[in-house]
Image: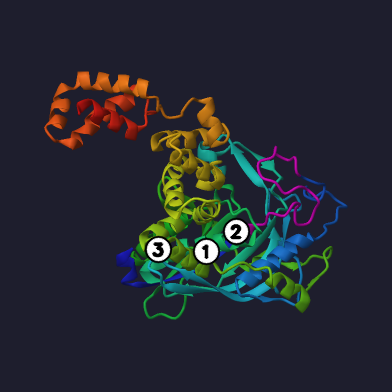
Amino acid sequence: MKKALQTYEVVLGFEVHVELNTETKMFSTATNAFGDQPNSNVTAGDLGLPGTLPTINAVGIDYGIKLGLALNCTIAPESRFARKQYFYPDLGKNYQTSQEEPAIAYDGWVDVELDDGEIFRVEIERAHIEEDAGKLTHIGGAGGRIHDSSSSLVDYNRAGVPLVEIVSKPIVGAGGRAPELARAYLSTIRDIVKALGVSDARMERGNIRCDANVSLMPIGATEFGTRTETKNVNSTRAVAAAVESEIIRQAKVLDSGGTITQETRHWEEESRSTRSGRPKSDADDYRYFPDPDLGPIVTDAAWIERLRADLPENPVQRRRRLREEWQFSDTEFRDVVAAGVLDEIEYTITAGASPEAARKWWMGEIARIANERGVSPEALGVTPADVVEIEKLIADKTINDKIARQVVGHIADGEGRPADIVAARSLAVVSDDGALTAAVEEAMAANPDVVERIQGGHMQAVGALIGPVMKATKGQADAGRVREIILEKIG
């Protein structure tokens, strides 16, 4: 990428789709829920059946306005829904109900904090409300792709789920930090919607998806190059990698005398590269026109100010406050933010854990198991209350750190709360002197050379006896008491 930046200026743009967590869909009374049986949360309107009429979800409008305010946007005095004419096999109406001009929120900005603390302001063109499409499952092909499948199944549960699409203005000046900015921007949007409570913000579930636009123009030029749009990237790390991959790919094409095709592309996690999708349409190709079945959204100052009063703390200011309160190093705090567990650590501290203990568990064993199982740490099933309870069990010497890590795994398996798991699995540490003394004597008899070294003053050799005792007790011995018994025995 460094070579590409010697010749070209990078121009970025992001379209972030945020699924709202309203109880019902945007234009019907169907339940808005994730993971239910396919096609169980649908109405006649969701299926596009003739004679059905939509109604507007008022909570969805409130959420859209709150998100617009959090992005420092102007709220339109009047906005309308429009029909976006486009072939959607997973929208029964064969058009998407969206907003064109004016959107409900426009002309905003958001400050994005980069890894070294530098603030990069991203200008927001608009944030508009629309409905999500359903989900297609392709059968018979490799990797679930449409191009070599024999058939496709449609699940309309997601069709009609309310979305806010946040569209940035073109971003120039990021240079070599473009991938970092992409990651930080998506992370900032996720933090904002989580703080607002308008979305579950679970990226692995598709609650937040990012379309990353990238184009290159020769340094010194004033006209933007042809852009590509990498669709539906659903992790902060992936969006950074997709931007970097596309910068390198486009530079190679241009350096060889080729031209960039305006198209959608798809991120391939396995190859860490993008692949071609379809030619990208411009807005005019969608033939927007006002939806005749939906009235305008007319806002007033009282409505807007009521929602503004409910806005949470700015994410950048919050992060700086928490970093100071917790006294984490810049590296420690940056890793916490990158791991997406800032909220979990804050909730755990509020529940009674120390900042160090909260970071240790969420960045350690919980993160390890989550990564192993391919889910986010918050989706693992371990709660802040569980972490606090584990820390109390350790402090009371009911369990040790090794056992505590096992308990985390059992919680993730759905076995219950920490104390219940310890009792059910008989995981409490062995503190009975009789059992520990017998294990110590056995270890000393098996390692006379170690005993001799300890007697000679090499106290660090005690660990060589504690190890066999821990093994004999399946890791459940009180290591501190074992050391005391060893020293008592040796004299």
Do the residues under discs 3 and 2 have CB atoms within 8 angstroms?
A: no
Q: Which mark identifies residue 247?
A: 3
Q: Which mark is residue 188?
A: 1
> Which residue in the protein does label 2 denote?
194
Q: Residue at x 52, y 56 (%)?
A: 346
Secondary structure under the numbered disc 1 in the rendered image: helix
Q: Nearer the viewer, residue 475 or 94?
A: 475
Q: Is residue 129 above or below residue 423?
A: below
Q: How many tags in the picture?
A: 3
Amino acid at the residue labelled 1:
Thr
Magenta range: 17-41
User: The residue under label 3 is which amino acid type?
Assistant: Ile
* Quarter of the C terminus within the rendering: top left
Sequence-wise first label, 3 or 2? 2
Residue positioned most to the right: 51
Q: Position of residue 428 (x, y in %)?
A: 46, 29
Q: Are marks 2 and 1 in contact (CB under 8 Å)?
A: no
Q: Residues within 10 Å of mark 1 (few under 14, many from 20)?
A: many
Where residue 301 sits in the image (x, y, percent)? 76, 78
Task: Name the amino acid type tagged 2.
Answer: Lys
Quadrant that contains the N terminus: bottom left
Residue 83 makes an appearance in the image: no
Q: Left of 176 or right of it: where is 317?
A: right
Instruction: State the image quarter where residue 255 is shown.
Output: bottom left
